Amino acid sequence: MNNEMVRIKAENVNFYYGQKQALKNISLDVYQNKVTALIGPSGCGKSTFIRLLNRMNDLVPRTRVEGNIFLDNVDINRGQIDVVDLRRRVGMVFQKPNPFPKSIFENLNYGLKVNGCKNRAEREKKIISALQKAALWQEVKDRLNESALGLSGGQQQRLCIARCLAVNPEVILFDEPCASLDPISTRYIEELILELKRDYTIVIVTHNMQQAARISDFTAFLYLGELIEFGLTEKIFTVPTQKMTEEYLSGKFG
Amino acid sequence: MLEEKKIIDLKRELIEYAALVEAMIQKSIMGLQERDAAMLREVMQTDESRANALEIRLEEICTNIIAQHQPKGKSLRTLLMCLKINNDLERMGDYAVKIVESSLFLIEQPQVKPYVDLPKLAEISMQMVKDSVNAFVNEDVALAQNVCARDSKADGLSAKILQDLKEYMSEDSHTIDRSLSLLRVAGSLERISDLSTNICEDVVYMVVGKVIKHHAALIES
């Protein structure tokens, strides 16, 4: 497990919403080209943690982060960090598909323009490639100018993944990406995540333990803001070292 | 990785394990026939520890797939079969080692009788091992049933060997130790063919979901 290359390193991370401490001393490594899943009951801090990895919590007032989060050995909370560039490098896909109320094409075009890709032909090339990688191209290639809101839930979520891929990220954060999808669309997204890990590093928050078991390489179990156990998914799900992990996995609480 | 792909990989590893066990049985008999102590020792010194490691690895893979994917239907039956076949192969490997132990004693002694039925029994047993694993991998019910049918042949040969050796022992008590060792070899081969039959009964269950062991088919009808 330690032969893998660490892409993101969290060290003694504490996080507060006002007075309330939501994360307690979390240290965790995210490995390159692996899927790392965060599991735990509601309110355990898994979404809070994943949102720290591209500083999405900056947008929440009266919050405070302590400790260090390194992306490729650079502390993302210190010094001259361009947050827009950080969020390009560490992309995010949310629980509910949130396409822009624009055409399918514009959904991807926008991010590319914001990120300074001025050449239209080049943008088109990148858009096609992103739609292909997100396994959506075949379904939308003849309707790129139609509204993204006309797509099904599963398609919208793949469009959001494509939008994230278009700007060429290195890490992709998924915050319960299948929570609002049916089983077939869920399977599509899961297969897609397994494909994507060849080129990207992936962190996924999921309420669905079985999803974590199926698709992740590493699993972190959080409870009440603490990291209870972190390790290889196949170990966590067969021989966890912590009694609390065992009980959560067997449905005794949470 | 997807469940389907993991099961394909698992089957591949199981084939490797079966091939090793088959080779162990073959060496244990060939070593006896050719009085080749080095070949016999190889089974105990090299092959057995490899077989043990493979057994543990296969069990781990099966456990992980069950924990991570909660397979259902045919995938579940396949995994349960893999666990049982893994167990059967491990025991076959143990029998090969038993044959080696007896053989190491026998090759130091004059031969009690020409080896005629024993190589035949070995041939049948090894082919049953090979075919049972092939039946599993290719989900070949016809082949599986064919293997089950061969078990009586193995039993017949084993009984004949026992009968012959009884005669030798009653004629000359000096042959008792060697005869008993030979009996152990024959008994091990016969058990190996039984275990192959077990695998094949499980193959039928895996493919068609029907139990045929313990003469269940007869009881049902």
Image (cartoon, rainbow, N blue to C red):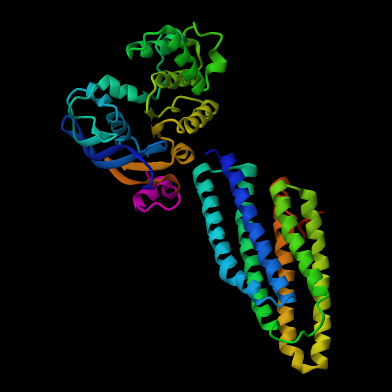
Reply above or below: A148 against A211: above
Q: Quadrant of residue B119?
A: bottom right
- What x and y, as percent, mark residue B104? 66, 80
Foreground: A153 or A41?
A153
Q: Is residue A237 magenta?
A: yes
- What x and y, as percent, mark residue A136? 52, 19
Identify the residue shown where x is 62% and y is 69%: B94
Q: Is residue A134 visible?
A: no
Identify the residue shown where x is 83% and y is 67%: B153
Position of B79 with respect to A59 (left or right) is right
Foreground: A40 or B9?
B9
Foreground: A152 or A30?
A30
- What x and y, as percent, mark residue A230? 35, 45
Which residues lie in the magenta part?
A235-254
Foreground: A89 or B151?
A89
Reply above or below: A151 against A210: above
- What x and y, as percent, mark residue B81? 64, 53
Q: Residue furthest top?
A: A145
Position of A238 with respect to A48 (left or right) is right
Q: Is residue B99 visible?
A: yes
Reply above or below: A113 against B186: above
Q: Is residue B65 magenta?
A: no
Locate the C terminus of chain A by quadrant: top left
Q: How many marks?
A: 0
Position of B35 with respect to B5 (left or right) is right
